[in-house]
Amino acid sequence: MQTPMPDASGPSDGIVAVDPLADERPAVEVHVDDDKQHARWTPTKIALWVAIALVGAVAWYMIAFSRGESVNAVWFVFAAVASYLIAYRFYAKYIENKLIHPSNKRATPAEYSYDGKDYVPTDRRILYGHHFAAIAGAGPLVGPVLAAQMGYLPGTIWIIVGVILAGAVQDYLVLFVSMRRKGRSLGQMARDELGLFGGIAAFIATLSIMLIIVAILAMVVVNALGESTWGVYSVGLTIPIALFMGVYLRYLRPGKVMEVSVIGCALLLFAIISGRWVSQSDIGQAIFHLDRPTIAWIIIAYGFIAAVLPVWMLLAPRDYLSTFMKIGVIAMLAIAIIVVRPEIHVPAITRFAETGDGPVFSGKLFPFLFVTIACGALSGFHAMISSGTTPKLVEKESQTRLIGYGGMLMESFVAIMAFVAALSIDQGIYFAMNSSAAATGGTVEGAAAFVNALGLHTADGSVVSTTPEILAATAQSVGEASVVSRTGGAPTLAVGLSQIMHSLIPGEGMASFWYHFAIMFEALFILTSVDAGTRVARFMASDALGNVYPRFRDLNWRVGAWITTGLMVAGWGSILVMGVNDPLGGINTLFPLFGIANQLLAAVALSICLLVFARKGYTWQLLIIAVPMVFTAIITVYGSLLKIFDPHPSIGYWANHFLYRDALARGETHLGAAKTVKAMETVVGNTAVQGSLSILFVVCGVIVMIVSVIKTIQALRGKGIIDTEEPAHPSRIFAPSGIIANPAEKKLEKEWAAFYEKYPEENLEGTSH
Amino acid sequence: MTHESAAHAAADRSTGSPVDRLVAFAKECRRFARGVLGSDAYDKYLHHHRVTGCDHEPLSERDFWRAKYRDQDHNPGSRCC
């Protein structure tokens, strides 16, 4: 079989249906001459890009080389935005020209499979917002917070460089590849491209990674709500609010989504405000003051019930609320950071980067920084969003750069802002909040003693220290009983955000309002992810079980749905309970597993893309995919090997496992943070599970990568070429590519407006451009 | 929103008085917010129905949303971390 040429993607190779309006229909893409005219470098354009490059260079210099007493947060924003703009304009364009080759003569699935429901050509700006709301969750808000223990520089570089060369590339490629396959999911594409064996490994990897991600996100919520009367009350109130919204939409005013979302948001604000009164009352304390294991079991029960209830009752209304909150909060965070411009006193790099014994998570900078900051730099989970829903809505092929690459840049920006918010808080408070209870003893005295003994310095050389009074006052200002050992990132970010917002809008008690506002929106995202993740996992499981007992594929079989949901909830629930009861802390031992899982999924997605483009006949251009893929493979495989084989008990799961098992065998009754025999037995069990999961992930991930590399090499030699793309259909619509239409596109848009005036039934989008 | 009013809104933005432009801008914002939230699903369905010229009556708004949520029950999509 002949190797297809990379540029053989015009409509000529597809079915050409006769267009009755061919004479009147304007062009479906800007004429090549107009395009060249637009691409020409004018002095204004050159000046603009030189200015952007200069701003970026100055900002990077301030961050990387200026060793003053502090760095202003605004430099992070400038460095990020200038880098994103340059990457989007030059690198993403380069990828488009060399590898993607979008053809605007070719119809997208939204056009050729137009059905008014799943496949609808959607205005690129709306789709951008929609896609961003689907990819951005709690991930970019949590990882950077934990990574702040290594100083500001490594995290900043990884978030910005990582997204440009890896994360955004992955999202862009997966979106395009899935779009050319009518919106096929990552799992389906893995089966199509890798064959049965690789497909099964990809399936096991995806399912188990999904469960661990749900478990650890749930743990972030548990840690944020444990012993927090205010938090439990206001987050708990979101359930009746969502139920009310569901009933309103179903029975009272169907379809009035905007209206019910505004009502829901007002109720949410009330839930946050009234939380103060509840937390100050005895009855409130008696009902809503819950310890962490209890909250974990409540979330498990919630996860099961929410996932078996119909979508309209809980999931759909919660989705509306979290979309609303997401856009609002992120805009608020950006404005606050730019207006308040907090000073950052954290050093560029701390000793934990080298020693690997940081209290927030253990392990050295390489590879653990790169797995701790997953979402925001590179997130494999996005491959599941970029395949599926979004590709069915894209109007023109050339818009994938904006939506795929540009959407991920925006998520990276959120991660930078969360990073800045975490860096802006006092270092003493940061370490008191993020060190596990095993280290601090859970008391303000213990935490102060632990932090003062760390012997850390701020950027101006003073020693990082805190006092029990400062910690107690911080807790009081945010309306919590304690801030000590509130690991998981969410409470730290909430403190950072509340301090920034409080200096913008001062007022009595406002800090505690903003703190709980931040906790609320993170919990809202995460509980939606828990519900949706359980459903997707159930769907995957019932599909697989259907091979054995076909009735599992029957979606209306309630018993089957209950069994598979129960299995999936048991899967993530057991990891959650394990983490919550972990005598060694939980987040600090489990979070690396989350990061490794997420990055392994990215490596899997990139290796599928590598194979797809190798089969399209590309050669050296594959480096665009191979470089981030190899880097991701190295950090995840190396990270996994350390987690499995490292002799240091703080890093290697098995080393810790044998340490505690031997101690028990010797008849010891306490060791390290485990003060009882029962706690020691828990550690033995937990480390065995964590160690086994590490092995499972890395084995599945490596199988997928090896299979795809072998098939890629075969493809490069011209063997085993298969084309899984849908046949090309000629396009009959037009839309601009970028977020702002250029003059040539505007001119063409006017022609189309006139055409649609005459033939309104030809306008699939239904709304004005 | 019909095609005619949409076309007018677009025209107003560039040519109309400041008030008209403000109204057009507000309409654009509303359209954007509804699109991102997914509130315009029924409008899209009706539009599809009109454009493709189906013979049967379109679903009512209530029935449409019921069917839509039922589809979501049967075909879950994931949210990101």
Image (spheres, coloured by chain):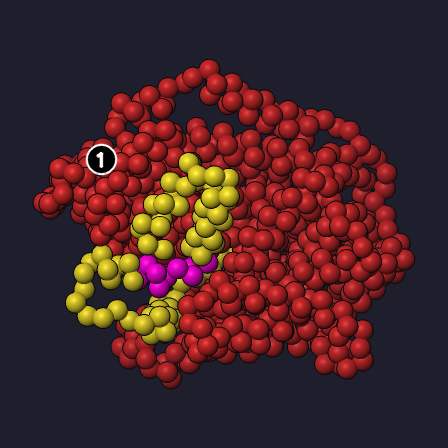
- Give, as a three-letter code, the residue at label 1: Ala
Q: Which image quadrant is residue A574 in?
A: bottom right
Q: Magenta region: which residues? A: B37-45
Chain shaded red: A
Q: Secondary structure at mark 1?
A: loop
Taking the magenta stretch, the answer to whether it contains residue B40 is yes
Residue occupying image coordinates x 75% and y 75%: A278
> Which chain letter goes with mark 1?
A
Residue occupying image coordinates x 42% and y 55%: B35
Quarter of the N terminus of chain A within the rendering: top left
Q: Main secondary structure of the magenta part?
A: helix
Q: Position of residue A228 (x, y in %)?
A: 73, 69
Q: Which class describes the residues within 10 Å of circle 1: few (<14), some (14-19), or many (20+)?
A: some
What's the colour of chain B in the image?
A: yellow
Residue denoted by label 1: A27
Residue occupying image coordinates x 46% and y 77%: A252
Q: Position of residue A411 (x, y in %)?
A: 53, 46
Residue occupying image coordinates x 23% and y 41%: A755
Quick check: A244 left or right of A663? Answer: left
Q: Position of residue A346 (x, y in %)?
A: 75, 40
